[in-house]
Image: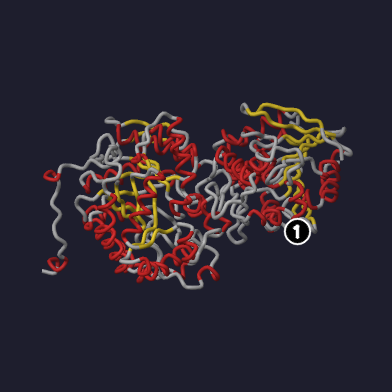
Amino acid sequence: MTEPDTTTIDINGYPTRVWRKGSGPKIGFLAGYGGLPRWIPFLDRLAETRTVIVPSLPGFPGGDRGHSVLDSQLDWLLAVRDLIDKAELAGGDLVGSSVGGSFAAELAAVWPDKVKRLALIAPFGLFDEQAPATDPWAQKQDDIAGLMTAQPDVYKALKRMPSGANSIEWPIEQTRAAEAAARIFWPLGNTRLERRLPLIKAPTLILWGAEDRLLPTSYADAVVRALRARTETRIIAGAGHLAELDKPDEVAAAILSFMS
Amino acid sequence: MKFLWFHLMPYKELPEDFKEKHPSVWVDIHSSLFDPARAHHMYNEFLDELEFAAACGFDAICCNEHHSNGYGLMPSPNLIASALARRTTDTAICVLGNSLALYNPPTRVAEEFAMIDCISGGRLIAGFPVGTPMDTTYAYGANPSHLRDRYYEAHDLVLRAWKEKETFAFNGRYNQQRYVNIWPRPIQQPHPPIWIPGAGSVETWRWAAEMDYVFCYLSYYGYKMAQNVMQGFWEEMARLGKDRNPYRAGFAQVVGVAESRQQALDLYSGPAEYFYGRCLHVDPRFAGPPGYVTEATQRAGIESQVKLAAEGNGGSGPSTNASSATKMQSLARDMKNIVANGYVIVGSPDEVTEQLHELATTLNIGQLMLLMQFGNLSSEATKYNTRLFAEKVMPKLKGLFADWENRWWPRPMEKWQRATLPAFMPQAAAH
């Protein structure tokens, strides 16, 4: 696994990290809950045949304190549009997971020209009283990993402080990512995304970890019911909420096949 | 020195196995544990106790705000304060306070506090806490990432609503109101004294100093644990060029006084263990919603932990920088350690006097809040504690800090200007 190229763009005055790796047609990725404090194998799989571009969401690792000036859902959506434009992803294929999945769906709904084909991995944005989503912000610290991935060690490894990192700033950055998600999705994760899903024009792949303990797989059905575009659904066995971490090969293969 | 008698209003009949059988006293405490008919008696006893404290000569009686909480039955402290305004005459009424960001619109706080100030003839102390994570973000669903900014904005709105003479439009980030014009308006001009309950956050200290408000450290862990926080507070005051007027600061302390130390231990051990064991049993899931603690405070907390670790000193007891719910997890819960750690001050009048003298002088505290009903302490014992304190302890400490001016105390109407409260005679209604 080699490191990606890193550039910095400006989003509302905050320096924002963009990773880029591979060659071929562009494919963007918006990260899920907790963000990406380091490069992950899933992105390498995509980079084997595509140019992978990964802009950080505001407040996520690499996104500085960009969340702090976003008060409304419209503020967030405009920031994500700016992110997609400045990362040169407009008009390309787009993948979003969890929190990032919600933004990818909103973007494709409101500005259909920005997204050619869409893949959503267990997106935030819905809430079903009959099958309530787990509260990710009311967890013992040790329980977060098991909520995010089927194999807790995978999430722990993603979040583990690398040697040489700033031991004060690293944990603050991880908390900031949880805060950034809370800033728009507190308390239920419900932005009534189902009302915009019918506006999506791009063919859409819905991926869901069979062992998602945060958003039950019944949410996949609700997303599919609301979509009007051509849609495929893949339930990934052995994967939790962030399926791209548990099953990088399988999730990447499903996306690449859908977008070929 | 000022003595404020502070009631938390705990539910007094949580089961003995509460800590083992139930995950939390707060947020998701089970409704089956609440018996409204028992609460009827508890509320009335609590109000009796507050009125009794006023009659014993305490300078103020205090109440506060909690939600979905088994040790604090006051979702609306203003209801309690208004009842107290009608049954007391000269005692200050300290509401500590209203969690500003939870009121929509926040002018509701300006209105209700103005009502209490009018009814009481200008005896209100207006407290403005941010509110705990359990109360604000979990029980009330407030967004932790917006909470502090909302709080500061609500404060600005309430202050303007009290001060401005003309109807005005408020164009805030979170609140927009075309016509702000509160009726009634407070007796105390330009506004009642403002006190800010808080913990070890430098930003809060600075803000309280800049606004010239009282900072109250509401800890349940006693004055020995509070040394670091209050030392930090006074160092910050010095850096800001503020004097060491002890009335700038308040502190809450659990106190149990009896004729002898042994009698005090016999009387107060059970209720203290009830308080620390059952009342402060909070699920660590609710310890720290992200964004509630500012990054500057997180940074200071991590730095001090790193420093302690480097010095090979893990510290004992709850860290002053830990979140309140995390602290509660590491509490001592048996009387021997509750006393040894200094959470409570119990003893004979002389012993309690000596320790409170040490508290007041080491922390430099002029506004002393006393928790004299705690846990399931009976009403009878609470009144005994209160009366004995008023007779044997208070007179010996009252003169402390006599050289300083308490600029943060209510300025009520002159006695002759105030309404006469009729005696309460319910039997008259029957005729």
Seen from the viewer's position, the closer of residues B213 and B154 is B213
Total label count? 1
Kindly state the secondary structure of the residue where label 1 is placed. loop
In this picture, residue A234 sits left or right of residue B127: right
In the picture shown, does residue B199 fall above or below B80? Answer: above
Q: Based on the displayed image, in which of its 4 quarters is residue A22 positioned?
A: top right
Q: Which residue is mark 1?
A: A210
Seen from the viewer's position, the closer of residues B307 and B176 is B307
In this picture, residue B368 sits left or right of residue B423: right
Residue sitting at x 86%, y 37%: A2
Q: Position of residue B57 (x, y in %)?
A: 23, 54
Q: Based on the displayed image, in which of its 4 quarters is residue A9 positioned?
A: top right
Residue B44 visible in the current orientation: no
Q: For the residue carrying disc 1, how many other residues have a C-alpha within 10 Å: few (<14), some (14-19), or many (20+)?
A: some
Tell me the amino acid under the disc marked 1. Answer: Ala
- Tell me the chain of label 1: A
Split into 4 quadrants, where in the image is the N terminus of chain A? top right
Q: Position of residue B333 (x, y in %)?
A: 50, 64
Seen from the viewer's position, the closer of residues A35 and A186 is A35
Split into 4 quadrants, where in the image is the C terminus of chain A? top right
Q: Position of residue B137 (x, y in %)?
A: 51, 50
Residue sitting at x 37%, y 36%: B244
